[in-house]
Amino acid sequence: MSTISLASPADFHVHLRQGDLSNLVTKHVRQGGFKLAYVMPNLKPPITTTDQALLYKAQLQSIDPAVEYLMTLYLSPELTPDEIRKAKRSGIVGVKSYPRGVTTNSEGGIESYEAYYPVFEAMEKEGMVLNLHGEVPSDALTDVCVLNAEPAFLPHLRKLHARFPRLRIVLEHATTRAAVECVKSLGHTVACTITAHHLAMTVDDWAGQSWNYCKPVAKYPDDRQALRDVIKEGHPRFFLGSDSAPHAPNTKSTASPLHPCAAGVYTSPILLPLVAHLLESFGALKRLEEFVSANGRAFYGVPVPDGDSQVMLQKVQGNVIEEKWVLGKQSVVPFWAGRPLDWKIVAE
């Protein structure tokens, strides 16, 4: 197979930041082959109201109006059932939950889900999606660290699904076999995103390598194999959410005891060729369109737009990933910088 034609790829988890950095990275969504971006709300300050989300959407559209932006709110004490109803009427699609302090800009994250049951009930009635960052904070007293923070979170997912069985829930950026098996065991209203970089890496790839450090961290080879296997089998409730997270190079390349390196891997400008490269490497290339378009669109109820053009990939040799993208004073370094990819976008 030397060419692949795909219907409207969709990235169901992406960080587009704000200000000058947003001007640089927002254009990379389409450059990477994608026509839909499910946008995370963890800005500074976070997006907690409908009006803020709509303003942010307008800012993104002014940068690249050719992409469809699906907006989310940040789960916080300010969020009420009335605001959920307003958000739904305004086209807001989901609410993102961050446990306090587990990743970038999560200082305002939650500590208890029970306090938000009225919000979840309203979301269930309105048909909005709850997006869960599936980790608990590290805690020496309970023996929780970055390597088991995701399995420790899964009882919360099971409890939320049991309490709100009609609420659509997405466990974001799964990294473990335990997470894959948990989602598979639950009902049709529970789905899961998988990133490109977690299909590529294990713990050895980020230990001592700040450019590959993200939250949640990549885990063991068997965990990576579980992610690959569930894509290869074509399970309909697993789909791409890149968690592409740009940071200034100096925040990734340096660290100190008081200032650890930023958590995030940046894949947007190379995303579709990267996913094709990875799926081909483990025998799942025939699942590419399901993984990057059909499954996520089906779960979210977002069909391919009428008359939408196809994105075409071509098998190549010597297509080397750029070392850095620059716009003015802003720059970002992508995942696998300087390495070759076996696929590139040739038509849209």
Image: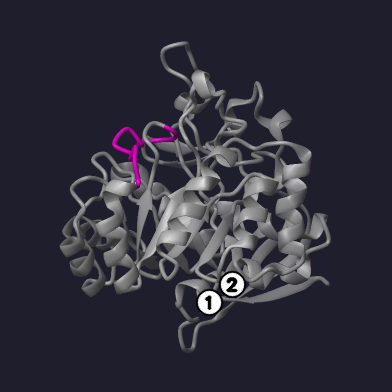
In the image, residue 120 above or below residue 336: below
Callouts 2 and 1 close, C-beta under 8 Å: yes
From the image, which quarter does the N terminus lie in?
bottom right
- Residue 320 spot, x, y in % from top left: 70, 47
Quarter occupied by the C terminus: bottom right
Q: Which secondary structure, mark 2?
A: helix
| Residue designated by label 1 | 298
Residue 204, placed above or below residue 277: above
Circle on res. 129: none
Of residue 300 and residue 317, the one placed in the foreground of this image is 300
Indicate whether 192 appears above or below 267: below
**Is residue 180 toward the left or the right of residue 188 in the image?**
right
Which residue does the numbered mark 2 point to in the structure image? 295
Task: Give the CA distance from mark 2 to mark 1.
Answer: 5 Å
- Residue type, label 2: Asn
Q: Count numbered badges in the picture.
A: 2
Residue situated in front as seen by the camera: 31 or 86: 86
Q: How packed is label 2: few (under 14 Cα within 10 Å), some, or many (20 or more)?
A: many
For this view, does 111 lie left or right of residue 142? Answer: left
Measured as percent of width and height from the top left, residue 15 is found at 42, 49
Q: Residue furthest bottom?
A: 307
Q: Which residues are magenta?
A: 102-113
What predominant SS class does the magenta segment belong to? loop
Query: The disc labelled 1 sits on which kind of residue?
Result: Ala
Provide residue 256's location: percent of width, then percent of height: 47, 12
Q: Whole-percent x and y of residue 344?
A: 68, 61
For residue 29, say whether it is visible. no
**Residue at image coords 52%, 64%:** 190
**Residue shown at 40% from the left, 70% from the top:** 66
